[in-house]
Image: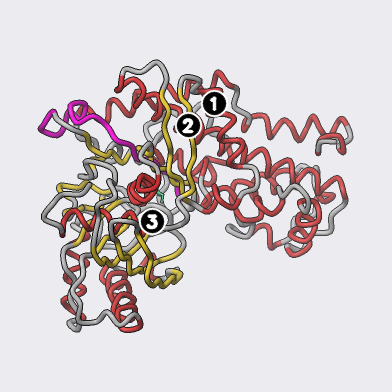
Amino acid sequence: MSDQDFFPPEMLLQVNKYLECFCLSQEKLLEISARLKNELIRGLEKETQDMMLATFVTATADGTEKGDFLTLDLGGTNFRVQHVHANEKKLEIKSEKKLSIPKEIMQQPGEKLFEYIVNCLGDFLDSSNLRGKTLPLGFTFSFPCKQEAIDKCFLIRWTKGFNCSGVEGKDVVKLLKEAVHKRGNYNIDSVAVVNDTVSTMLSCSHKDPKCVIGMIIGTGTNACYMEEMKNVKYLQGEDGQMCINTEWGGFGDHGSLDDIKTQFDELVNRESINPGVHIFEKMISGMYLGEIARLLLLKLMEDKLLFKGQTPDMLKKPGNFETKFLSEIEMPDKGLENTKKILTSLGLKCELVDIHVVRLVCETISTRSAHLCAAAIATVAERIRENRGLDRLETTVGVDGTLYKEHPNFKKRLQDKVEQLAPKCKITFLDSDGSSGKGAAMAAAVVSCSTPVI
Ligand code: GLC
C-alpha cells in the first residue's frame, strides 16, 4: 500500500495540490537538461563570473603519485585534516582529524577562519608527530573560485552558509600562507587547491580510470568533469584536457529554473544568507531539503490537513526539521516508526494518517532532488559523449556527500532516472569512501613533484 491509500479522497486532492509542483515529468527534466547544456556551453565561451571554472587539473590520476602529503578539507559540515602517504601501489590515510566548524566561525571575518584552520593544522602536526617536516599541502576548498593556477585561487563567493568577510576576491592560498606565517611555529610546502568535486574525481579515478566526472550531493551540490581544452574558449591552448568545475549549484540564478520554482523554494531562497544565488543547489542539497519540507508541512498544517491544524512552536523555527529526518523517515523498514519519533520530538501529537502525509512530503521533496541531479549528470555525461564523438559512452562518476550516501532511496532514484534521461550513456556511480583527502594529495603531488602526475 502506498502512503496515499491512507488518505480520505478529499484530503488526497488537497495535499496533492501542494505536491504536484514538485513532480517533474520526463519532458520537463529533459528540458532542464537542455537548458543546463546551454549554460555549460555559454560558460566555456568566455570567462563567466561563477560557472564553468577552470581548475588547472589537466588529467586524472595515473597511480604514480608518491610521497607524504597534508590535506585540509573545508566546505561541508565538517573540517578535516589528513596525513596521506602515496606509493606506487596505493594511497593511504595515515592519520586524520575531523572537526565541525563552529557556526560563529562561518560568519566571522576571514582572518578568524584562517586562524582557526591553521591552529587545527598545527595541533594535528603535533599529534601526528609531523612537526618539523615541511610537507606539500592539498587544500580541498569547496566554494566557487577563479583559479589562475593550481596554487592561485580567488574565492568568487561564499556558499552553504559561510559568509566570512574579507575573503571574496582574495587568493585563499595567500590567506592560508599568511595565517601559517603568523602562527609562526610550523611551515608548509607548496599548496594545491581543489574543489571537492575535483578531489572526489581524482580519488575515484585512482580506482577506476573511467572516472572523469566528480559529483557532490551533500550540504551543497556540484560536479566537475574533464573537458577538451580546445572547447575552453576563455583559456589559451588547444591541446589536452582541463577539468572544469561546473558550479551547477548556480544554475538557475539567471532565471532558467523560474518555471519549476515552488513557493517553498522562493521562501527558502529569500531566507537564506545568499538570496538569489545558487538556486539549483537550494532545490537539491542537504542544507536546504529539510527546510523545504518544514515550510511545506507548515502550509499543510495551516490548511488543517495535518495534525488537526496544531502548529507547535518547534516546527515554526527555521532549521528545526533537519535533512537527515528525510533519510530516517524514508527508511524502508523503520520509516513509519522513525516518523512518529521525529514528530513526537517536535512536540506533535500525530495519527497514522499524519505519519503517511509526512512521509509522502519527504519522499516528494527528495525525489525531486534526485531527479534534478539526474538531469544535470545526464547533461554532463552527454557532453563528454559528444566531445568524444561516440554513439555510446561508458563512464564513471565519483560521488561524495551525505545526502547521496545516507538517504536510503536517493541512489536508486538517481540511477533509474539518469538511465531514462541519457540512454546513450552507461553511467556507473562510484562512492568516494569519504576520502577527498586522497584526491587533494594527488593534486598536491602535481605542484610538489618535478614530474607532473595529474
Ligand atoms: C557549493 C560550492 C561548490 C561545492 C559544492 C559541494 O555548491 O559552491 O564549490 O563543490 O557546494 O560542496
Q: What range of the chain is rendered magenta?
A: 220-238
Task: From the top left corner, tell me how far across and down residue 291 is, in percent.
Answer: 59, 51
Farthest front residue in view: 89
Residue type at numbered disc 3: Ser
Label 3 element class: helix
Camera-side residue of 324 and 227: 227
How packed mark 1 is, by other alpha carbons closer than 10 Å (few <14, some 14-19, many 20 or more), is: some
Q: Earlier in the sequence, mark 3 or mark 2?
A: 2
- Amino acid residing under circle 2: Ile
Badges 1 and 2: C-beta atoms under 8 Å apart? Answer: yes
Q: Which amino acid, by three-letter code, is at mark 1?
A: Glu
338 or 318: nearer the eye? 338
Give the x, y percent position of residue 33. Answer: 45, 25
User: Could you give the CA–CA distance between mark 3 and mark 2, rounded to whole angstroms?
Assistant: 21 Å
Residue picked out by circle 2: 427
Q: CA distance from mark 3 to mark 1?
A: 27 Å
Q: Would you say residue 276 is visible in this rendering?
A: no
Please indicate whether residue 79 sits to the left or right of residue 217 in the image.
left
Q: Name above or below for residue 180 compared with residue 243.
A: below
Residue 449 is inside the magenta segment = no
The answer to whether residue 229 is magenta is: yes
**Residue at the spot of label 1:** 419
Q: Residue at x 73, y 62 (%)?
A: 346
Question: Reading the chain from its start, which is encountered first: label 3 or label 1?
Answer: 1
Question: Which of the 4 quarters of the picture holds residue 7?
Answer: top right
Q: Position of residue 365 (x, y in %)?
A: 63, 40
Q: Gap in Å between the C-alphas at discs 1 and 2?
A: 8 Å
Mark linked to residue 436: 3
Residue 184 in sight here: yes
> Count the marks: how many?
3
Is residue 149 placed above or below 4 in the rendered structure? below
